[in-house]
Structures are given as C-alpha cells and as structure tokens.
Image (cartoon, helix red, strand yellow):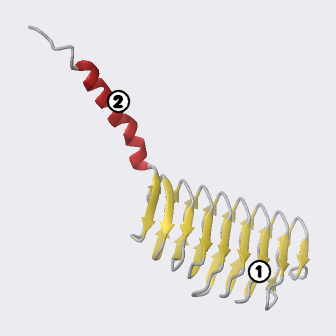
Amino acid sequence: MRVDTASRPLATLLALGCIGLAPAAFAGDYPCPPNRGAVTIDGDIVVKGICNLKGTNVKGNVKIYSGGTLTATGVRVDGNIQAENANAVTVRSSYVKGDIQAKYLKGSPSYIENNTVDGNIQLESNRRSILVRANIVDGDVQAFSNTGGLVIRGNRIDGNLQCKSNNPAPTGGNNSVSGSKEDQCRRL
C-alpha cells in the first residue's frame, strides 16, 4: 500500500495553524450586555449598556464607556475597573487587583463598597454622587474636581487620602489612613 507523503506537510501546517489560532478565540474583548454570571473571562469586559456582573472572574480590565452602567457584585478583576463618561458604576464585595477609576460620571449615583483594591481608587470630575465605604485599599484614594457629592467613610487606606477642588467638599469619616489625609479630606 502506498502512502501519499506529499500532502503531509500541508496537513501539518493546517493543523498547526488551527492550533495557533485557537488561543486568540479565547482572549480579547467581551461585550456586556449580555450580563455575566459566575464565569471566567480571559480578556477585557467592555460595557456600553447596562451590565451586571455577579461572581465573575475577569482576567483583564472592565471598561465602562459613554452611556454604560456597571453593577458588579462579588467579582474578581485582575486588571482595572475604568469608567469614563459612563452613567454609573457600582462595585460591591469584590476584589480588584488594579485600580478603580471613575471620570466624568453623569447618570445615577455610584457606589464603591466593601471591596479589596490592591491599587488606587481615583475619582475625577464626576457630576453625580459617589459613596466610597468600607473598602480596603492598598494604594491611595483620590478625589479631584467632583461636583455631585462624595461620601468617604469607614475605609482602610494603606496609602494617602487626597481630595482637592470638590464642590461640595467630601463628607464622611472613620477612615484609617496609613499615609496622610490631605486638603479637603484631612478630617475624614
């Protein structure tokens, strides 16, 4: 019996090509909606509408864009949670390896509560109220130029608590800060 060996290199290349493409199918951006439950996402979640994450493990970042609203409960994010021009961001009882960043929020009130954040919480130029409560933050909590009202209460902050140019000034208290409490937050 004669075996056609001429087609073997082509078959091998095709098989290797398919194997080489397989990982790309699992990494990248994942839209939300649809909502995500207790699954692992090997990439970034991109929020452009109303998105609910519950028990989700995100190996990348969560990015909330204009018009987006995120509600995340009991999630793990290996990167950052970043919102710009979004309606609202609520993160509760979650672990974030990077930062939580909210800039230009303009919709409903936002809540950052009972989380462990290895990086910073950064809030800038938001027009709606934000509650930052009972978080453990390895970095800084920074609030600059917010106009919607800000309550910072009962957090453990290993870095600094920095607040400037917020109108009204942030309220709250009972924050344990290893670094310094600065400017508008020096009494919080």
> Badge 2 local density, few (<14 within 10 Å), some, or many (20+)?
few
Residue, x 43% and y 65% (percent of image)? 31
The answer to whether residue 50 is above or below residue 17 is below
Q: Which residue is mark 2?
A: 16
Residue, x 83% and y 83% (percent of image)? 165
Left or right: where 64 falls relative to 35: right
Residue, x 89% and y 65% (percent of image)? 179
The answer to whether residue 99 is above or below residue 145 is above
Chain-order first, disc 2 or disc 1: 2
Could you tell me residue 18's position as x and y percent?
Answer: 33, 36
The answer to whether residue 128 is above or below residue 98 is below
> Badge 1 local density, few (<14 within 10 Å), some, or many (20+)?
many
**Count of numbered tags:** 2
Amino acid type at circle 1 is Arg
The answer to whether residue 128 is above or below residue 91 is below
Residue 55 appears in the figure: no
Could you tell me residue 107's position as x and y percent?
Answer: 57, 87
Residue 28 appears in the figure: yes
In the orientation shown, which residue stands out farthest toward the bottom?
168
Q: Secondary structure at mark 2?
A: helix
Quadrant that contains the N terminus: top left
Could you tell me residue 154's position as x and y percent?
Answer: 77, 77
Residue, x 49% and y 65% (percent of image)? 46
Camera-side residue of 80 and 137: 80
Amino acid type at circle 2 is Leu
Q: Which residue is mark 1?
A: 153
